[in-house]
Amino acid sequence: MLDPGIDAIFNPKTVALVGASGEEGKMGYVFAKNLTSGYQGKVFLVNPKGGKILGRDAYRSIKDVPEGIDLAVIVIPAKAVPSAMKELGEKGTKAAVVITSGFSEAGPEGKALEEAMMEEADEGHVKVVGPNCFGVYNCNIGLNASMGIGASEPGGDISFLTQSGAYGMAIFTFAMDHHMRFAKIMAHGNKAGIDDYEVVRYLGQDEETKVICLFLESVERGREFYDEAKEVTLRKPIVATKTGRTAGAVRAAASHTAAIAGSFTAYEAAFKQSGIIFARNGMDMISIAKGLDWQPLPRGKRVGIITNSGGTGVELADLCEENGLVVPELSKELRSRIGGLIPSYASARNPIDMTPIWSKFVELYSEITRILYESDEIDVIVPIVLQRAALMPDVCTALADTVNDCLSRGLRKPTYVCWVSTRDGLRNMDLLQRKRVPCFDWPERTARAVGGIASYADFLLSRGVDLEGR
Amino acid sequence: MRPKAAEIIERARSEGRSLVLEPEAKQILQAYGVPVTNEAVCGSPDEAVMVAQRIGYPVAMKVVSPQVVHKTEFKAVCLNVPNDKDVVEIYRSFEQEAMRANFDLSGVLVSEMVTGQEMIIGSTKDPQFGNLIMLGMGGIAVQVYKDVSYRLAPVTELDVKEMLSEIKGAKLLYGFRGRERANIHALVRALIAVSNMLMELDDIVEMDLNPIFVSSQGVKVADARILLS
């Protein structure tokens, strides 16, 4: 069963904004604006002065709100939060997102305030997100209870939990630029009333979520997190970035094991063992999530590289192998099939280097891709769309159509494009990405993303998970 | 908790020690089914000779002392001791080393010499994730090469196989260049046994089993150190 507290955060029927303001530039204004644009549920604005805010009646107190509150969004000063929480509890409010800063992150006085707030929340059975957080989104119902810019279009199925608000949102908006669509987003800040594992469990059960992204500075209740993640990854992928260090004590290490094991070692072990894909940074996290969301999982680690630049192909081949992938030489039969299409001086060995034969790019990118789809020698196709190829919209459109045609024929194999272009070519990247063919910038990012995805597929296969339909 | 392990931990606690001595650590391991070297702690040169004869030459001799954590830092280990005369001499030299370096000599451990690939199994406790277990290439070079892999306990057979795939030197176990193939199953069983032990003995905060010898015959822990909370 979905946790009712967390469900009230993501799927509220009624939202109260405590600290709404009609004054532009104030936090209470940003939230009032965001909550009243796109969200279909009822929104109640609370401000002690009453009157009208954005043309709506404002309520002088929480008590005055005429209906039950599923979700309260709190933007009032920290000192006033515990008593507001008490009132919310008395009213039977299910959940609260506390945006306000000045709690445990700000020293002992703030810590005491946070404890007082949590006492009231526990007493009143209010599930708390934050404090000191950016807010939450449910893009599929148009809910933007955050200080960020608009939600992504409905229909998204990537969900994102982030400890860092602003960086999390930067990642999210970058991803939207790349046509990725999200389902649920939560910035949980100080994590006073919610643990990472609870959110992982919720998103694991949530039918709208297909890919889970985590941007974490620390993990509280690590053991529960590990146990939960281990269950979830068998059904859907989790991609995690971990920054910063644990609060773990620095010990005088009397043993070799402790001397070698840094604080991150336990995270790495937990991620590996539970099937979480570890991303080295926010950008890698987004690349991996995009690949997982748009393409089927690879059934193996053999990469076929299609390029018009020998140097780029070789660099990508190196990086692929360094990231746990294999770039095998193709069989004689396959080589001769491809060799019939490309110039005699070109190479069909893999990387398949068509050479800069511009006049045939449209045909060659598509045809070689199709041949690799039909071959059982390759599990992952990576066309390098480079320079002049990236400037040719027809190359991108034909490639995207070929990929989707092969997928619709039931050839379950992923294609990830390694994109190397000038700024002029960027709009052509959209031609691929609008059709859910993911593009990754340059060989290194491509190899890391593909390596991460393939290692997840390998994790599932070695645990006997059937990849049918995935 | 196995009674033998409980008894040893209780004794260390009552003596105010957080270090479990090597012979004690090996008894705990044995109680959980982890194979260790055939050995005995001796209180005199005569006893050492008797034990060495029973085990069969050559033997290894080691200082047993609550103050000696890293034995290689003192003259506290002697390998391949070939005969009665040398056993007596080395026993005396340990006594002198104890006087010189000012540690208490609780006894001298006389144990069989074993061969095989040197590996290490270790553990630490992570504040968030609990017991972290390590497998890697062992011996004194462990801190130099750091050719090791970590998992959270408890581990499964699949976890151990995946750990081995992350360790470069593990290739040596699979019959590399005509060497004999090591008994991987025995290693897997040993690691799972250690992992079960860690889950049961919450008092253990750090552990080094180094070296353990892995050969076609199986696995034997040749040195062990356990730290209690």
Image (cartoon, rainbow, N blue to C red):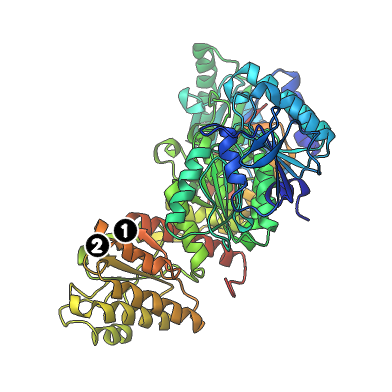
Which residue is under mark 1? A443
SS at mark 2? helix
Q: Is residue A413 above or below residue A180?
A: below
| Image location (x, y in percent) of residue A161 | 58, 46
| Image location (x, y in percent) of residue A417 | 36, 66
Chain letter for mark 2, please: A
Residue at 48% x, 80% y: name it. A411
Among numbered discs 2 and 1, the one appearing first in the sequence: 2
Amino acid marked by disc 1: Pro
From where the camera sits, is residue B113 visible? no
Q: Is residue A425 above or below residue B20?
A: below
SS at mark 1? helix
Chain letter for mark 1, please: A
Q: Nearer the viewer, residue B11 or B87?
A: B11
Q: Is residue B187 above or below residue B42?
A: below
Q: Nearer the viewer, residue A455 or A430?
A: A430
From where the camera sits, is residue B161 visible? yes
Q: Nearer the viewer, residue A378 or B32?
A: A378
Amino acid marked by disc 2: Thr
User: Few, some or many C-alpha atoms within 10 Å of disc 2 (few <14, some 14-19, many ≥20)?
Assistant: some
Quadrant (top left, top right, bottom left, bottom right) of the C terminus of chain B: top right
Among the 4 quarters of the image, the one containing residue B153: top right
Which residue is under mark 2? A312
Q: Is residue A281 left or right of residue A367?
A: right
Number of labels in the image equals 2
Q: Between marks 2 and 1, how big is the CA–CA gap?
A: 7 Å
